[in-house]
Image: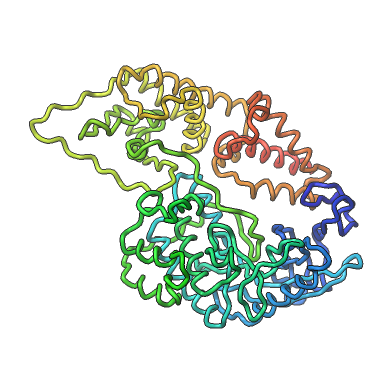
């Protein structure tokens, strides 16, 4: 069976290192490490090595996680790297908290005459907060203020504990917090001092028991950590606050911070209640001395919050995130930009799918009237627009007595019927509404770039554009039918992520797809995609992940299912 490195070089399964680039290859499924831990599957890969789900043969095949340490550093840095690995093991041994994975052992194992190091930790089944956020983004949602405050209230005691024992995490971000399925509590993971070692460029520094190394994600880590290599308890509080802002807005940290002015975009992208804003502002102060110095102090200032907390909807994603998964993800910017406040408000109105590009303009009128004859019986759900901010609820003002009624939109009966037909057809195909709207809008605004600068009305001057939108919607439905996707693949449109592709690659590498390789999957999927959308891949360097990219994933998912059935 062939084995692939991260660069997709082909190797014999007996090899431990890639014959072309020298990179350590994944351990084989079923291989036993240290005569005790049997590899179940490969979970992920980062700069330090790989992460595996394993069974402990000495503990009734209890599941655990092996973090392989095999950093790509030059020889002169290897001793320092080993020292940092041992430092992480020492730190983890001393941490005893129900919301921190329990440490089992550190191992030094010889494989192919080379030393490899492993950490063994608890396996935590759950979803990390980036996966949860990504699933919500795909459905046009983000985390509510109540949910974010609840997360802060549950995470701050964990930080208070580690800071009391002189440990600074240094790498807080949504993908390093897991919402545990068993008790719905957030679990803090990845205390690695070895995860992001730069090769032959010296080590960045932070205080941790006398050993200094730098760590932190750009955007989440404060300046003193990234520039000076210093970290304090207030540095973790800064990162936790940035995590909260990302969950609230769905925006990349760099999009929330005005680097020219040196200010966070409060009241623009970031909209929260005044008291919560005051707490978060203090947590992300530029100077460490201006921030809260203790996690307990933040908790005290959050005691006032009486908002009814809602349970996290873990059913929004079925991806299982394992403890110590490498932090290869970075928060992605939420797609869909609005051109002015008027359009943002209009997008929040509960319009049926076929009228969403044509929301009634809010400019030059104090009255909003939605004439949606016959459509309310068909469409019952309110559309949450995919935006970069949390939109306020819009209440329709009442018409003053004695005022002249506004002019009614002139949407024709035939257009209403056509819109209803599109809705019914989409529902019959079980294509998610949010994905379908994005797909149609993408084509519509590509053909009509001038329409992006204004909202379209239901009046006669926009009849031609409405007609064109309907025609595009029909074409999209035709293409999706021609794709001949399975029902499960259609239902998941809008929810595919890079994690799906990683899972397929791991299946291929583990031999679960027989002789079928990831390269063959790419070729077969590209061939089908190009028949449906000629020239799209050639003319675009990258497919839009929210629209055409979703169809590519769906085609690939069906191809994988077909191969699995044949084996």
Left or right: 442 as drawn, with respect to 58: left
Judge whether residue 96 can be spotted in this image: yes
Left or right: 21 as drawn, with respect to 398: right
Residue 294 picture location, percent across and down: 45, 77
Judge whether residue 380 can be spotted in this image: no
**Total labels drawn:** 0
Residue at position x 65%, y 23% from top? 534
| In the rendered image, the vertical position of residue 560 relative to residue 471, given as above or below | below
Asked whether 528 or 245 is in front, the reply is 245
Residue at position x 53%, y 63% from top? 223
Scheme by which the image is coloured: rainbow
Q: Quadrant of residue 180?
A: bottom right
Residue 466 picture location, percent across and down: 39, 21
Q: Quadrant of residue 355?
A: top left
| In the rendered image, the vertical position of residue 325 relative to residue 8, given as above or below | below
Q: Quadrant of the C terminus?
A: top right
Q: Quadrant of residue 463?
A: top left
Residue at position x 55%, y 61% from top? 173
Residue at position x 71%, y 41% from top? 560
| In the rendered image, the vertical position of residue 156 relative to residue 537, given as above or below | below
| In the rendered image, the vertical position of residue 457 relative to residue 313, given as above or below | above
Residue 25 picture location, percent across and down: 82, 57
Q: Looking at the image, which residue sits at the far left?
A: 402
Left or right: 499 as drawn, with respect to 348: right
Residue 374 picture location, percent across and down: 31, 28
Left or right: 91 as drawn, with respect to 25: left
Asked whether 173 or 485 is in front, the reply is 173
């Amino acid at each position: 069976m062939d084995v692939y490195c991260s660069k997709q070089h082909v190797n014999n399964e007996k090899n431990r290192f890639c014959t072309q680039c020298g990179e350590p290859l994944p351990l084989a499924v079923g291989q036993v490490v240290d005569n005790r831990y049997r590899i179940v599957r490969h979970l992920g890969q980062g700069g330090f090595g790989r992460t595996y789900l394993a069974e402990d043969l000495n503990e009734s095949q209890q599941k655990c996680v092996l973090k392989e340490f095999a950093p790509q550093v030059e020889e002169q840095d290897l001793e320092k790297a080993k020292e940092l690995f041992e430092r992480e093991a020492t730190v983890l041994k001393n941490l005893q908290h129900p919301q921190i994975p329990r440490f089992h052992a550190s191992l030094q194992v010889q494989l192919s005459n080379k030393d490899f190091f492993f950490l063994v930790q608890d396996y935590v089944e759950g979803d990390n907060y980036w996966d949860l956020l990504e699933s919500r983004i795909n459905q046009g949602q983000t985390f509510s203020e109540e949910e974010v405050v609840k997360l802060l209230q549950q995470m701050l005691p964990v930080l208070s504990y580690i800071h009391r024992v002189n440990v600074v995490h240094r790498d807080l971000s949504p993908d390093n917090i897991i919402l545990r399925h068993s008790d719905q509590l957030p679990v803090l993971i990845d205390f690695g001092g070895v995860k992001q070692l730069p090769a032959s460029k010296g080590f960045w520094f932070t205080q941790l028991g006398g050993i200094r190394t730098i760590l932190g994600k750009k955007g989440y880590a404060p300046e003193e950590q990234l520039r000076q290599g210093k970290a304090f308890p207030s540095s973790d509080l800064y990162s936790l606050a940035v995590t909260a802002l990302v969950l609230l807005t769905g925006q990349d940290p760099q999009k929330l911070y005005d680097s020219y002015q040196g200010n966070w975009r409060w009241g623009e992208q970031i909209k929260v209640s005044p008291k919560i804003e005051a707490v978060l502002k203090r947590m992300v102060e530029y100077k460490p001395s201006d921030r809260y110095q203790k996690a307990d102090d933040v908790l005290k200032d959050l005691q006032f919050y009486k908002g009814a907390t809602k349970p996290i909807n873990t059913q929004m994603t079925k991806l299982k995130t394992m403890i110590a998964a490498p932090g290869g993800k970075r928060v992605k910017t939420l797609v869909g930009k609005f051109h002015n406040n008027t359009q943002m408000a209009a997008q929040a109105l509960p319009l049926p799918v076929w009228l969403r590009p044509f929301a009634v303009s809010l400019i030059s009128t104090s009255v909003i009237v939605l004439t949606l004859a016959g459509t309310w019986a068909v469409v019952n759900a309110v559309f949450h627009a995919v935006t970069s901010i949390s939109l306020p609820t819009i209440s329709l003002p009442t018409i003053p007595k004695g005022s002249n009624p506004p002019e009614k939109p002139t949407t024709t009966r035939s257009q209403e019927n056509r819109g209803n037909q599109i809705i019914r057809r989409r529902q019959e195909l079980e294509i998610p509404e949010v994905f379908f709207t994005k797909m149609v809008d993408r084509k519509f605004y590509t053909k009509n770039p001038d329409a992006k600068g204004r909202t379209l009305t239901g009046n006669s001057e926009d009849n031609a554009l409405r007609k064109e939108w309907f025609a595009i919607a029909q074409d999209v439905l035709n293409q999706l039918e021609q794709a001949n996707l399975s029902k499960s693949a259609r239902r998941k449109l809008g929810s595919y992520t890079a994690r799906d592709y990683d899972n397929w690659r791991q299946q291929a590498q583990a031999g679960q797809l027989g002789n079928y390789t990831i390269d063959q999957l790419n070729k077969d999927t590209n061939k089908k995609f190009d028949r449906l959308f000629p020239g799209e891949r050639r003319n675009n360097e990258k497919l839009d992940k929210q629209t055409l990219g979703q169809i590519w994933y769906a085609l690939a998912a069906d191809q994988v299912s077909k191969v699995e059935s044949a084996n």
